Amino acid sequence: MNNIEIKTPCGNIKGIDNNDYVEFRGIKYANADRWEYPTQITSWDGTYDATEFGECSYQRRGFEDDATCNAFYHKEFRKGMTFKYSEDCQFLNIYAPKNAKDCPVLIYIHGGSFTGGSSNEGHLSGVEYAKNGIVCVTINYRLNAFGFVAHPDLKDENGIKANFGLYDQLTAIKWVKDNIDSFGGKANNIVLMGQSAGAMSIDILISSPLCKGWFKGAIMMSGAGLMRTISKPLTPKKITRLWDLAIKNAGKTNINELKDIDKRDLFYAWLDACKEDKLSIIDTLPVVDGKMITSDSMRMDNIPDIPIIIGVTCTDMIPIVMEALTKSYVKRITKYNKCYVYNFNRNLPGDNLGAWHSCDLLYAFKTLKNNWRPFEEIDYKISHEIFSAFSSFVKTGDPNCAEIPHWSSDGKTPMRFCENTASMPWDTKLLLKNTFSNNGAEF
């Protein structure tokens, strides 16, 4: 392994030289104590060693066997890999073209229901984007009980404290803006990309008053519009029930006493509370904190004027609902800006689960080779199509390129990535059928 060393505003940093691209792993962008906002790192002593991935947030697989507690995604994305876990998990990875200068920047935020996931799983890699002239950044942030606690009694002199995972994301982006020029990226040319909870995070960030005007575009996969419709952010008061259960499970009397308990005890007090709380899927989401998310920042009329790609897969969670939500969001976006919609319709080989939630990431990052499935030549063709379209979007704000048919920006006719990729109307009958019959919806 060859190394490369460059100078940044934080100091010198050592990465991996892969001939046609360079890679910097596990860069610490911030520090934070439990349930405290992150403090951006602006300098370090000596030369920073960025040749190994950093820790991701503690989550269930940090305490239990992943193959048992999350068998499906373990097999798809993590089998054979090892991960490190920490509460202090503010690390990012940078993949850049060799000798890059003024390249567009793509920042990817991983999904996982705000409760799991990490930035360096088998399906995530910025290598192909770096080879294609794009600086790609992937980030870790705090999750579950460590990143998305909310309670009326958890506050400071500035009001409610919450959404720590979102503030990690914000700080990571700020670190990138302050340092990415040293890696060959252009700080004022950033596109955000995320899937599921990552897409929901991006929807929050592009409309937050804390980072207004920072982004040139956004790619939201399987999550666009959820925070503006059926999953609108609640106030901490409205999710008190979950955290009151966690307080009780931990044998404590108030939320602040949980700040000092063992990480395992905190996680399982929260996890058991989720099992007791019938609305835990809502109660574990970001909340209105008055700063990152205000009472009106997630309204449909507060979508910024930037080009946006949004899409879903044909067996995506509840497919017919995902279609309806996407249409609703697109209808609002296209009043003000360009919106490119896609529907991923390739049923993956190897089983009968179809195009399951998050499978399109394997194609978008060109990481099919990291998966167990018997992919065929057509899969690699589809991967090249969606990768090329996303690359073009990052570079120009328009996904149209030689590799795909014309993709309209009016949002009315999605680009259907499949065996015969083309712009086609929504296949509502198929999505309705998949809603009730396809096992992919379970995931």
Image (spheres, rainbow, N blue to C red):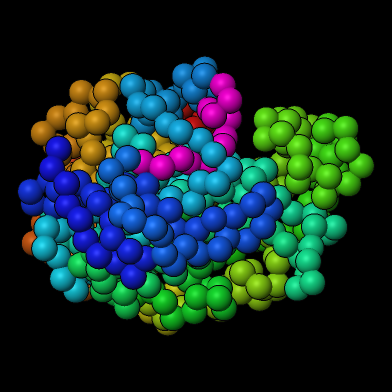
Note whether 3 is above or below 106 in the view shown.
above
Residue at 54%, 29% (x, y): give it: 62
**Foreground residue, 310 or 13?**
13
- Asked if residue 105 can be seen in this view, the reply is no
Considering every residue shown, the one lying at the far front of the view is 46
Res 347 quadrant in image: top left
Residue at the spot 58% in from the left edge and 25% down from the top edge: 63
> Where is residue 52 drawn, in percent x and y?
32, 40
Whether residue 370 is visible: yes
Q: Determine the residue positioned at 50% across, 64% down.
A: 40
Which of these two is toward me, 220 or 146? 146
Q: Which residues are magenta?
A: 53-64
Residue 359 in the image: state x and y as whole percent.
35, 38
Q: Is residue 399 above or below residue 266?
A: below
Q: Quadrant of the N terminus?
A: top left
Q: Position of residue 322 (x, y in %)?
A: 49, 50
Q: Quadrant of residue 396?
A: bottom left
Q: Is residue 225 magenta?
A: no
Q: Is residue 333 left or right of residue 149?
A: left
Residue 281 sits in which quadrant?
top right
